[in-house]
């Protein structure tokens, strides 16, 4: 066993010791299969700092908590496009998927190439990452994005899309409505007609993910274009 493998095993043991059945029960309701408090996990990452070599060893373990830690130990510029593609397909749980997209892909040099590659992928979970990256473009850098064509796709496909893809498409619908005054009414109308997430349980003081309500609330707050 190499020193790096020994260090990996020590970290895996540390994560295993942090396993909390109550945390796991809460996470499993959201499709995540680990029981490690994320504040404590971030504490380990802060101690270890950037460690791309250790990150790859931890990712290879297949453990979800170890994958989350691996993402925190990675630097976006150190992860190649093909590696990010493979990691997304191996992500497994929603939390690993979201952290990978938000912490590594969005902050790295391959985000646009991966957005284009993933957007129409046959795997709906992979496609959802493409839509998430597209939503980011709509908000931050809309030049070159055909938002009318996006609304055409959303109108045709969102209602029957698998859950994670549907959620990502709905987010894109809302962001178009929030940021693009010219397409706002069309975006609202699509949301009203499709009724996706209309009855989603929303805690008090939180904004509903139902696109017409989400759009109206963010525009009311001054977040619209």
Image (tube, grey):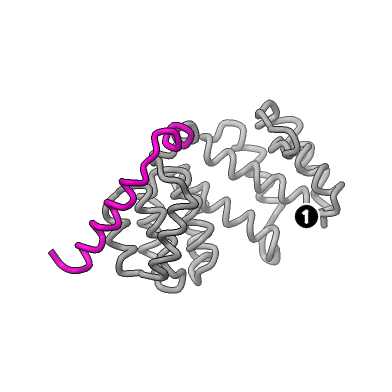
Left or right: where 106 falls relative to 7: right
Q: Which residue is mark 1?
A: 179
Q: Secondary structure at mark 1?
A: helix
Callout 1: few (<14), some (14-19), or many (20+) C-alpha neighbours within 10 Å? many
Residue 29, given in percent of the width and then of the height, sits at 48, 31
Query: How many marks can you see?
Result: 1
Extent of the magenta region: 1-28
Main SS category, magenta section = helix
Residue 193, given in percent of the width and then of the height, sits at 74, 30
Q: Is residue 105 magenta?
A: no
**Residue beneath the point at 19% across and 69% down:** 3
Tell me where residue 43 sits by quadrant: bottom left
Query: Which quadrant is the N terminus positioned in?
Result: bottom left
**Residue beneath the point at 73% across and 51% down:** 176
Left or right: where 190 falls relative to 167: right
Give the residue furthest to the left: 1
């Amino acid at each position: 066993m190499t020193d790096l493998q020994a260090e990996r095993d020590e970290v895996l043991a540390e994560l295993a010791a942090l396993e909390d059945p109550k945390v796991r029960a809460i996470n499993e309701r959201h499709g995540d299969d680990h029981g490690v408090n994320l504040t404590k996990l971030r504490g380990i990452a802060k101690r270890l700092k950037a460690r791309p070599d250790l990150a790859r060893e931890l990712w290879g373990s297949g453990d979800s908590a170890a994958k989350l830690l691996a993402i925190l130990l990675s630097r976006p510029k150190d992860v190649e496009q093909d590696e990010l593609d493979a990691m997304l397909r191996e992500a497994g749980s929603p939390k690993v998927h979201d952290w990978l997209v938000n912490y590594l892909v969005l902050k790295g040099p391959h985000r646009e190439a991966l957005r284009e590659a993933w957007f129409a992928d046959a795997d709906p979970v992979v496609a959802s990452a493409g839509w998430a990256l597209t939503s980011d473009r709509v908000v931050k850098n809309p030049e070159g994005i055909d938002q009318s064509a996006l609304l055409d796709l959303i109108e045709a496909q969102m209602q029957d899309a698998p859950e994670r893809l549907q959620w990502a498409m709905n987010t894109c619908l809302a962001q178009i409505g929030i940021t693009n005054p010219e397409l706002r009414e069309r975006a609202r109308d699509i949301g009203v007609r499709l009724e996706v997430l209309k009855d989603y349980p929303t805690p008090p003081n939180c904004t509903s993910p139902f696109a017409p309500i989400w759009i109206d609330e963010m525009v009311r707050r001054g977040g619209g274009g």
